[in-house]
């Protein structure tokens, strides 16, 4: 039955369960872009009402068809397998609590082992540090003041950095750039002119307030920062609900431009299109992929395309030195629904929780479920008190308010070792962006007559 619907050529058909009729296009990556025809992008079949036994039998069929096993992981919440053959990567996973399997032809990334290669450099430090970098927030003024953005940095035992997202162009002031470089120098104990290595930059989703600060910072300091790896999983733009009149501009001008800028400013960086269930190690940090936009395609006759770019956020749990950081990006309630279907609450508990979407969503189905000791909030106090008070109150209902840290107040660094914590605060630097004197900081030109 499924053989007649199967459309991944050269890959064995999944015979058990109910194959969803649509072959889903999963978008491109750093090096294959997003402007090619959908046939050149990654693809996915979704199978409902299957079992762990049937999934493992299918993995045997992939091996029998000449695909060699790569990454493999088995947990109570699911089975996750990578297969490589003929220059192709097939990533397949089974989610135990939904009885679903997904088979993905990944045409964008590289095998996980190749991405991780040479990651465990000699340890030169005995602790780790997590920084929530302070970004300037305020009432919105186009091109000058932003209401969103976030940037997290983890310094590892090998003195390399793991970066998450970045702010908006309006936060790319000279003062903010200079302060970030000071903080990176302090984290890595390096001198001016000495190279700093970024083991990986992870981007949660393809919104400018989560990409631009990093890209612009690399434009300015690419000669000092060496980015070894980049990982993200952005969906096919047509699946995101962007209106047709804006879609071409988003893809051709912004998204493709951002990919080209990343390749220019981070030459030679390895790219991984991350998928649910992957768990990778970079020095003493492990990154577990809990959810991608691929999981938002999850039920027959229900939500077969994601509801927006925000709900395409990749959710990752980062663990280091007995502590953990759960990155939600701009996840909203539909992401929470799937998280609760896939995982038990204990599997999502963390030391630090990044509050989702700058508190633009209530996200009570996430906060009532995920246990955390501290909450890192990528938002400014003014914005919270004016229009996010109810959402802030939701956080207060489930977490200790004395352990809230607002990104718009200050930069905060948590030094952790064996589960113990030492907290240091730094004054927020930067203010409104001045297009007349700071436009050279931007990778994308301001519109004429701005």
Image (cartoon, rainbow, N blue to C red):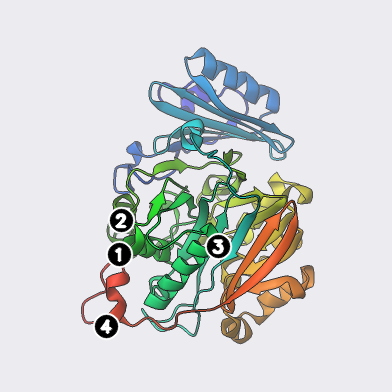
Question: How far from the left and from the top, in percent, is residue 383?
Answer: 57, 82
Asked whether the beta carbons under mark 1 and mark 2 sit within 8 Å of each other, the answer is yes
Disc 3 secondary structure class: loop
Look at 34% across and 43% down and name the residue there.
Answer: 268
Mark 2 surroundings within 10 Å by alpha-carbon count, few (fewer than 14), some (14 through 19), many (20 or more): some
Could you tell me residue 127's position as x and y percent?
65, 53
Where residue 243 sits, quadrant-wise, is: bottom left
| Image disc number at residue 330 | 3
| Badge 1 density bin: few <14, some 14–19, many ≥20, Cα 10 Å | many
Q: Is residue 137 left or right of residue 170?
A: right
On residue 261, the disc is 2
Instruction: State how far apart marks 3 and 1 are (Cα).
Output: 23 Å
Depth check, front residue: 283 or 262: 283
Q: Earlier in the sequence, mark 2 or mark 4?
A: 2
Please, what secondary structure does the residue beneath circle 2 have? helix
Contact check, label 1 and label 4, Cβ < 8 Å = no
The residue tagged 4 is 436
Return the disc, 4 or 3, that comes first in the chain's sequence: 3
Q: Mark 1 falls on what kind of element?
A: loop
Crowding at dot 3, Cα within 10 Å, few <14 / some 14-19 / many 20+, comes out as many
Per the rendering, the mark at residue 443 is: 1
């Amino acid at each position: 039955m499924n053989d007649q619907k199967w459309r991944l050529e050269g890959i064995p058909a999944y015979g058990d369960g109910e194959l969803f009729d649509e072959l889903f296009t999963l978008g491109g990556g750093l090096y294959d872009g997003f402007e090619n025809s959908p046939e050149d992008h990654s693809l996915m079949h979704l199978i409902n009402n299957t079992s762990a036994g049937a999934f493992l039998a299918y993995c045997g069929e992939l091996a029998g068809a000449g695909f060699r096993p790569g990454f493999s992981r088995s947990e109570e919440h699911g089975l996750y397998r990578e297969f490589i053959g003929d220059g192709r990567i097939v990533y397949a996973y089974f989610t135990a609590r939904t009885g679903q399997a997904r088979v993905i032809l990944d045409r964008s990334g590289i095998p996980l082992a190749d991405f991780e290669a040479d990651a465990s450099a000699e340890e030169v430090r005995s602790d780790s540090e997590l920084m929530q970098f302070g970004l300037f927030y305020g009432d919105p003024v186009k091109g000058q003041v932003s209401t969103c953005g976030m940037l997290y940095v983890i310094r590892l035992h090998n003195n390399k950095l793991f970066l998450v997202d970045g702010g908006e162009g309006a936060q790319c002031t000279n003062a903010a750039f200079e302060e970030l470089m000071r903080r990176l120098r302090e984290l890595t104990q390096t001198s001016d002119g000495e190279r700093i290595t970024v083991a990986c930059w992870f981007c949660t989703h393809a919104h400018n307030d989560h990409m631009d600060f990093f890209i612009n910072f690399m434009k300015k300091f690419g000669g000092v920062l060496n980015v070894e790896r980049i990982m993200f999983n952005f969906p096919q733009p047509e699946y995101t609900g962007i209106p047709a009149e804006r879609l071409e501009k988003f893809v051709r001008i912004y998204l493709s431009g951002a990919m080209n800028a990343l390749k220019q400013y981070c030459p030679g960086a390895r790219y991984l299109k991350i998928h649910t269930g992957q768990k990778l190690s970079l020095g003493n940090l492990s990154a577990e992929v809990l959810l991608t936009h691929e999981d938002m395609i999850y039920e027959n006759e229900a939500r077969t395309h994601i509801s927006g770019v925000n709900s395409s956020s990749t959710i990752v749990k980062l663990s280091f030195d007995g502590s953990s950081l759960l990155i939600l990006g701009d996840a909203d309630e539909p992401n929470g629904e799937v998280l609760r279907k896939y995982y038990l609450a204990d599997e999502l508990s963390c030391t630090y929780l990044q509050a989702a979407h700058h508190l633009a969503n209530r996200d009570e189905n996430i906060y009532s479920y995920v246990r955390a000791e501290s909450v890192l909030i990528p938002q400014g106090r003014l914005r919270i008190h004016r229009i996010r008070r109810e959402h802030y109150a939701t956080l207060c209902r489930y977490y200790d308010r004395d352990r809230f840290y607002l990104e718009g107040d200050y930069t905060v660094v948590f030094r952790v070792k064996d589960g113990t914590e030492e907290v240091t605060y730094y004054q927020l630097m930067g203010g409104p962006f001045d297009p007349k004197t700071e436009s050279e900081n931007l990778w994308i030109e301001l519109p004429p007559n701005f």
